[in-house]
Image: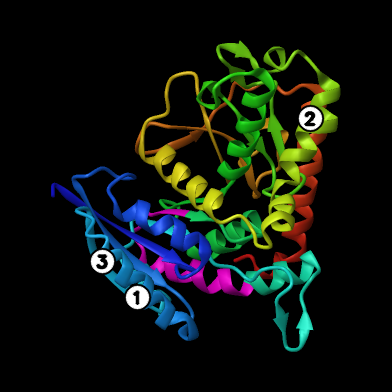
Amino acid sequence: MNSSITVAVTGAAGQIGYALLPRLASGEIFGPDVRVNLKLIEIEPVLPKLEGTAMELTDCAFGALGDITCTADIETGFGDADWVLLLGSMPRGIVVDGRKIEERSDLLRINGGIFTDQGRAIGRFARPDARVLVVGNPANTNALIGRSHARQEGQLWMAMTALDANRAAAQLARRSGSEVRSVRRLCIWGNHSPTMYPDVFNAQIGGQPGFEAIGSDQAWLESDFLPVVQQRGKAIIEARGASSAMSAASSALDTVMQVARPTEAGDCFSAAVFSDGRYDIPEGLMCGLPLFSDGGSVRVIDDFEISDLSRRYIDASVAELIEERDAVRDLIG
C-alpha cells in the first residue's frame, strides 16, 4: 500500500452504513493502493450490532481494508479522520420522552444538540483539513450547526444533495431517451428537502442544453419532473416501508469521489456548502450550489445563468433554509 486514509462514519450500524461500508473498504472509492482505516461510531446500545458489521467487513477480505475501530466515543471515533461521513440523525417519528416527534422544528432542535457535540469533536480531533459530509436529515441545517462548532476553516463541511442530483439525472435521461451518464452540469440548488430545485436549464444532456433535450416542455418540467424528484424520498418510504438506504449510500460515496477526483472540464457536481453571497443567496447558509473540484480543493462555479423560473424555485428553497437557521439560531456557535 502506498498510502492510507481514515474514514469516520456515524450511524454505521444502520441501513445506509450497511450499504456504504463494503464499497468504502473494497478499494473502489479511494483506489486499490490506498488502505482504508474505518472508525465506526454508534450509540452504546447498538455497539453489538456494529461489531457484527465489522466482522462481516473482515470476512469480505478486502485488500484495501485497514484497521476497524468500533466505538461510542466520538472523540475516539473522529480522531485523525481524513473523511467524516455523518450518516446518523434522529428520524421523524421517533418517540422522545413519550412524545412522537413529527414537527420539523422539533426535529431541528433534537438533531441540533447532536451536531453541536459532533461538530466540536470533529473540530478538535479530526484532521484540520478533513472533509465532512452530512447525510442525516435535516442535513443542511445539521451541517450548519456542526460546522459552526468545529471552527476549523480548513475543514470542508457539506450536506448531501447528490441523491437529489442522481434522482433528477435518472428522470431526465428517461424523458430524453439518453443514457444517464450523458447528463452533465446538473446542479441541485437550496435545501435537501422537498423544496430543493434540480436545475435543468444549466444542465446538458447528450451534448444538448438540458431544457431542449426534454423538448422544451415546461409543463412536464413543473407538473411531472419537479414533483417526482422532490417527493421521491416519500414515494420510496411508501413503497418499501423504509427510507432510502441503497441510493443514499451510493450518493454519499459519489460525493466523496466527486470531491477527491478532479471534475471534468465543463461539468459540475452537487453538494450544499457554506454560502458566501454568490447567486444572491445570503451568506451563512448551507446551500446546494454548483461545485468544481481540482482533486484537492472545492470551489463554487460562478457562471451559471439563473432564469426567472429557476430564481422563483431557488428563492423558495433558500427561504426554507433561512427559516431553519432562525429556528435553531441559539444552537449555532
Q: Let me know if residue 38 is in the magenta part.
A: no
Q: Is residue 135 above or below residue 171?
A: below
Dominant secondary structure of the magenta stretch? helix
Numbered circle sitting on residue 58: 3
* Residue under pointer 1: 70
Which residue sits at x=69%, y=62%? 241
x and y percentages locating residue 306 in the rendered image? 72, 23
Local crowd size for mark 3, using a 10 Å CA cut-off: few (<14), some (14–19), many (≥20): some
C-alpha span from label 2 to label 3: 49 Å
Q: Secondary structure at mark 1?
A: strand
Q: Secondary structure at mark 2?
A: helix
Q: Quadrant of residue 221?
A: top right
Q: Is residue 101 above or below residue 169?
A: below
Q: Are marks 2 and 1 in contact (CB under 8 Å)?
A: no
Numbered circle sitting on residue 311: 2
What is the number of callouts on the image? 3
Local crowd size for mark 1, using a 10 Å CA cut-off: few (<14), some (14–19), many (≥20): many
x and y percentages locating residue 220 in the rendered image? 82, 25
Which residue sits at x=51%, y=45%? 251
Which residue sits at x=75%, y=58%? 324
Q: Are marks 2 and 3 in contact (CB under 8 Å)?
A: no
Q: Quadrant of residue 33?
A: top left
Most foreground residue, 105 or 68: 68
Q: Secondary structure at mark 3?
A: helix
Q: Is residue 184 above or below residue 41?
A: above
C-alpha span from label 1 to label 3: 13 Å
Q: Let me know if residue 120 is in the magenta part.
A: yes
**Lower sequence index among marks 1 and 3:** 3
Q: Are marks 1 and 3 in contact (CB under 8 Å)?
A: no
Q: Read off the magenta span.
A: 113-132
